[in-house]
Every structure is written in structure tokens, then in C-alpha cells.
Amino acid sequence: MKIRLDRTLCDGFGICAKHAPEYFSLDDWGYASLAGDGTVPEVDRDAVMRALLDCPVHAIIEYGEHGPLGERSPAINAEDSSEPNVGAGDSQAISGFVR
Amino acid sequence: MNSAITPADAPVVAAWPGTTPRLLRFTPGVEDYAEYAGSGGYQALDEPDRLLDEVERSGLQGRGGAAFPLAVKLRTVRDAGRAGAHPVVLANGEEGEPASVKDKWLLRNRPHLVLDGVRLAARVVGAQRAVVYVSDPLAAQALDAALAAADLDLSIGVVTVDAGYVAGEETAAVRAVNGGPPKPTDKPPRPFQQGVDGQPTLVSNVETLANLPFILRHGGEEYRAVGTDASPGTFLATVTGAGRPAALYELPHGVTVTDLLALHGVSPEQVQGVLMGGYFAGLVNRSVLDATLDHETMRGLGSGLGCGAVAILTEDCPVAVAAAVMAYFDRENASQCGSCFNGTAAMSAVTSALRDGVATEEDLARLERWSVVLRGRGACATLDAATNIASSLLKQYPELVASHLAGACDSCRTSAFSTLRPYEVETAS
């Protein structure tokens, strides 16, 4: 299972971090970010699904084989793409504001 | 048509001594179709794949701030098109950085050079459709006139939005072109996966694209004839600060900061440091005087060249500059991600208190922690920019921070540097 978290939707309820604390980290104000890359092994699936289903603003989205489930598929699957992660630079300034 | 549409507070424009400019042009007024085509523009492209190979050889990196290799992006989007998608090219000219003017200058003065680059990128990726995305009305006017004069076998639209720091981010550009607000979306998907109309989209800065006609004409090797191995070619640098008029220079990557200061008429003795990459890459103290302007060197200093905007700090107190930039982020963030609107507000409060001599040790400890833990917690890099400002202030100017903690900065106590948009090149209308 693969999930993504849309931080523009997160309203800081923090329920996700109660159900699956290894996958969701909260900041000082209770807003969540994904702790990893969103890959969820089978053993953790139930906890993460509870987080997903209990999020009041639906900020957690399951990613299917060809993109977000229930949404229009991306033309290229992130998994299949050859472009490296632009955020993976070793610079302290991370990747720059991608314009 | 050759009317000048450059505003009154236009920057000084100059090339690097001894280097033939590839992007700048010194004839006043807008370059029209006849001039551009007559000087070798709009050349036929018979083999798009060969141009892609030359772009790869050139090592051309994105000029929007991230320095991402253009050839990688081009190839990814082209291959998606060959797998059945309908690629789109989105030329990003929405220069949200107040301290940068290069994209506006290119679009206002050399619209055909940009459109030629858009046309070539579209051919390489197999796009039938392209969009030039801007906020500057003068740029849009120049583009409209250029599009009317040029006969391109490609549909190119101009999309204009209100200016804003976050509006120039690549997913904000896609969202705006798709009819939404010009605000970033979280990733994935990135535009090369799912962009305009859900199609794989090449989002490239207009300066990046403006280099393609040179590469078509002269090849990748010639492109690398100036610059450094890891940062080939020239780049447009917006230089502000130091009490001097703003300037736009075309510099070969790798020139020394001291040579740039000499060109700009600033004595190194006066310099306290620089604000790099517009508001993105943070502050660098006087150690910048030993640096060269290329991506590898600036990364080595814990900073970045970013979009090529360099603000020189002479009289301005770095603590007050950091406070002004942080207040800008507090105001100008997209108000979308909680970590960002809370984090920028909190870091702005501390940097302002530090400037005003009322910050405590506990405030500083919080600022230091936020500068680490908030990194990467926003959908776009605005929050990262704010953490760069905080961490660079603390690391680059520890003595100044300590003296401000003791309330001992005379300039901040009497007339602190304070402005809504530090080192803004043109006053926002």
C-alpha cells in the first residue's frame, strides 16, 4: 500500500498520529507530515487505513498502482518515472524553490 | 514595432567584460521578429532528438532556482508522450522573487528569444501546446505582440496571474493554468507526471528555455565554453543592495564575488555579507568574498545560487534583513499548510524580537529548533526558504545574534532596516 498526505488539506486534528505514529509526525502546532515516503507494508496497513478513514479532512490519500485511487490517473506513475527526486539534493538549501 | 516598454525604475543592464552575451541585448527597445529572425533566431529544427542530445551535452540547468538538469526533464516528458500522453510545455515567467528581475527583463525585451526556446522545447518533447505563464503586464504585452508577429506551428497561450511569491512555484503555475488559484499543490504528483490538463508537463523557467536557441545553433560543447564543469554556461544575475542601483548582469558561472563587486562598484571592505538566491538560499557572511558564483561553490557554503539574485549587505544589519524577509514569508505564504503559516509566523516573531533587542535565550533556542524540524514540512519550498533564513542567520552571524540578544545593536535601536520587500528591484504596483 502507498499513501500520500496532502498538507494543504491537513487541519491539524492529529488523529493520524494517534493511529499510526510511525507514519505521521506532527509539528508544534499539530500539523502532520509523512514520516517516510508513504510506503506501507502489509503489517501496518490496518493502522494506516484507520488514520486514512478517520482524517476529518481526507488529507490522506491511498495511491494505487496508477496514481491516486478515485482520482484521475497521472499520465506517468511516480513509481515508474526516471526523474530523480528534485528534493533529494545534499545542499542545505534543499532543492530551491522549483520555478 | 520597437517601442520601449521598460519601466522607469529599470535596472542597469550589462554583460561580463570579455564575454559575449547570449541572453542580454543592449539595443534599446523590444527586439522585434525581423531583428530576432535576422540575427539567426527561429532556425529550423530537423532532428529534435539530436537537440536533446546537445542539451544533455551542454549540461544546461534550470534557472528558476533548483538548477535541475533540463535534459532529464525533457527526456522524461518526451518519453511520456511516446507512451501515449499529450505533453504540454509551460514556460514559467512568473518571477515571484521581489529581488529578481531577470525573467521580466527577458520577456519584456526579448520575447522572441523566449518563444524560440518554448518552440524548441515543445518540439523536443512532442508537445502541440505550450503556455507562457506570467504576472507582469509588460511581459504579457510584449509576448502578445511577439506571438502576433511570429508564425509558429504550435499553439502558444499566455496566462497572466496576480504576482505573488508562491505563484511562481511550478505546481502553482500548473494549478493556475488549469483554472485554479496560483498556489502550490502537494507532491506527488509533480508536473512532469501530471500537469496541465492532467498531462505530463515540462515546466521550465523562461531563462532556461531562452538558452535553447544558442544550443541549437552552436551545440552543447560551445555552450560549455564558459562557466564551470558543474555549472556550465552563463546566467542572469540580479544584483541589489549596497546602496547602489539594481543591476542585471549576464555572468559566466564561476566568476569571483570580488570581481562582481568591482563591476558593481562596491568595495569589499564595506560588505557584511549577502542574501543569496533571492529570498530562498539564506544569508552568507563575509566568507562569500572568497567564493565564486556557481552552484557547487555556493552549496559548499551551505547556501545556493538559486535564481541568481544577489543582495549585497553593507549598511543593513543582517539581523534586521533576516527579520524583514521572515516577515515577508509570514505575509506572503500560501496560507495552505499549517506548518508553514504557523512556522513562518513564529520564526518571524522571534527574528523581529531579536532585531528589536527583546528576544530571550528561549526564543533563540526555539528558532534554532524550528530551523531544523520545519524543513521539508510544506507542500512547496516557502517554508524551507524561511528555515534557510533562520539557520543561516544563526550560523553565519553568531556574534551579531549575541549582541542583539543583549540589545546592543545601535543601528537596529535607532533606525532598524525595515521594508516590506527587502531589495525589491521594482516597486510592486
Image: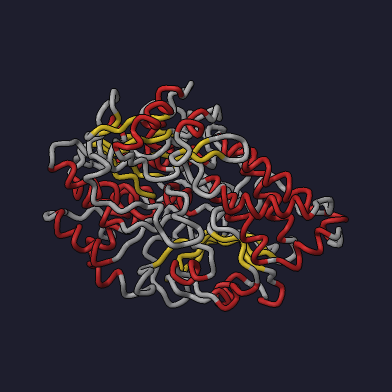
Q: Residue at x 30, y 56 (%)?
A: B70
For the residue pair B115 and A54, the one nearer the viewer reads as A54
Which of the 4 image quadrants contains residue B225? bottom left
Q: Position of residue B194 (x, y in %)?
A: 29, 36
Q: Is residue B139 something one can see in this rendering? A: no
Q: Is residue A47 above or below residue B307?
A: above
Q: Is residue B371 above or below residue B172?
A: below
Q: Residue at x 32, y 34 (%)?
A: B157
Q: Position of residue B127 (x, y in %)?
A: 21, 41
Q: Is residue B248 something one can see in this rendering? A: yes
Q: Position of residue A96 (x, y in %)?
A: 46, 54
Q: Residue at x 61, y 74 (%)?
A: B287
Q: Residue at x 33, y 30 (%)?
A: A62
Q: Position of residue B427 (x, y in %)?
A: 63, 45
Q: Is residue B258 left or right of residue B81?
A: right
Farthest front residue?
A43
Which of the 4 image quadrants contains residue A1? top left
Position of the C terminus of chain B by quadrant? top right
